[in-house]
């Protein structure tokens, strides 16, 4: 599902935007509109179980990374390409969305550029203490919790929303192991496919983001063979709002500017 979308006339590129965990697509409408004025069409993807999507996670209604990547994102990419034939295809996202953008490039190919905003591998070892121990413990707690409850009760735990149990078990696997090689139902050679991803990549880190340390983005970029990597750090002065994991969404102009400048000269990117 890729809805709603904002499309300028003859955009130089079309971006499939993947939200953070539990965040409805409508929360990124300001970003999509800002990108439109900068010449980049933006389709906002709605995760299963979130916002306007009709499914809701529960016992007997479950999904994980495989379903999101091989079914939902594959369909969204087909829709994007049909709507913008001949245009460069970008895939990007916020938080877990940035991880899925990279995974989608490995599984589906044909991606011309990747964008990861406040995103990275959630390896517990990359967080500073004491958050390191909290994240690591959470990664071990999620499998038994989601099997007991039948889903992930994020609205009660104040982290994400009501999410599918398998989705959170897959996420917890990356927390514990720091890689994507043990994800249910995905190809055994996913790691090798990731190492063949060469699309230019932009990573935006927020100065006050405690949920995603800068090292986490470096780890995400490192699983690829991207031929051109750009890292940008935005602070409160540049954003006009606190530079944390979520507040930038209220004033996304600096993010849109950074993305548009990056794409304007992808061949000039340097590590």
Image (spheres, grey):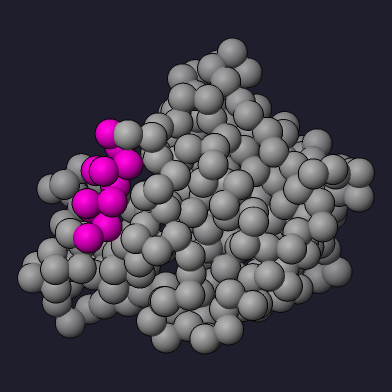
Residue 187 percent across, percent down from the top left: 52, 86
Q: Which segment did they paint magenta?
A: 130-140
Which residue sits at x=76%, y=59%?
Answer: 226
Which residue sits at x=38%, y=53%?
Answer: 21
Q: Quadrant of residue 110?
A: bottom right
Of residue 103 and residue 87, the one placed in the foreground of this image is 103
Of residue 127 and residue 163, the one placed in the foreground of this image is 127
Residue 71 left/right relative to 63:
right
Quadrant housing the C terminus: top right
In the rendered image, residue 244 lying in the magenta stretch gets the answer no
Which residue sits at x=54%, y=17%?
Answer: 236
Residue 24 in view, yes or no? no
Of residue 174 and residue 71, the one placed in the foreground of this image is 174
Residue 168 left/right relative to 41:
left
Is 184 rendered above or below residue 50?
Answer: below
Residue 249 in view, yes or no? yes
Residue 156 percent across, percent down from the top left: 13, 48
Is 234 rendered above or below residue 101?
Answer: above
Of residue 240 and residue 36, the one placed in the foreground of this image is 240
Q: Which secondary structure type mostly characterizes the magenta part of the structure?
A: helix
Residue 243 left/right relative to 258:
left
Is 182 rendered above or below residue 118?
Answer: below
Which residue sits at x=60%, y=47%?
Answer: 218
Residue 91 percent across, percent down from the top left: 65, 59
């Amino acid at each position: 599902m890729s809805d709603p979308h904002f499309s300028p006339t003859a955009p130089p590129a079309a971006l499939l935007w993947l939200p953070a965990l539990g965040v409805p697509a409508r929360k990124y409408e300001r970003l999509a509109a800002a990108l439109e004025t900068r010449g980049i069409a933006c389709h906002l993807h709605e995760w299963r179980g979130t916002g306007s999507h009709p499914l809701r996670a529960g016992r007997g209604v479950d999904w994980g990374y495989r379903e999101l990547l091989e079914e939902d994102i594959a369909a969204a990419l087909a829709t994007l390409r049909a709507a913008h034939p001949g245009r460069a295809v970008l895939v990007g996202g916020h938080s877990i969305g940035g991880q899925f953008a990279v995974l989608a490039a490995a599984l589906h190919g044909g991606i011309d550029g990747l964008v990861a905003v406040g995103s990275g591998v959630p390896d517990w070892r990359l967080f500073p203490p004491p958050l390191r121990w909290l994240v690591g413990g959470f990664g071990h707690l999620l499998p038994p919790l989601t099997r007991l409850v039948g889903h992930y009760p994020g609205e009660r735990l104040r982290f994400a929303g009501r999410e599918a149990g398998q989705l959170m078990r897959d996420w917890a696997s990356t927390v514990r192991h720091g890689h994507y090689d043990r994800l249910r139902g995905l190809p055994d050679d996913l790691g090798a496919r990731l190492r063949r991803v060469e699309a230019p990549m932009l990573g935006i880190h927020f100065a006050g983001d405690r949920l995603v340390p800068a090292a986490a983005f470096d780890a995400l970029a490192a699983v690829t063979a991207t031929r051109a990597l750009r890292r940008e750090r935005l602070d409160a002065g540049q954003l006009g709002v606190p530079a944390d994991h979520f507040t930038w969404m209220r004033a996304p102009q600096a993010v849109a500017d950074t993305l548009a400048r990056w794409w304007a000269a992808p061949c000039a990117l340097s590590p």
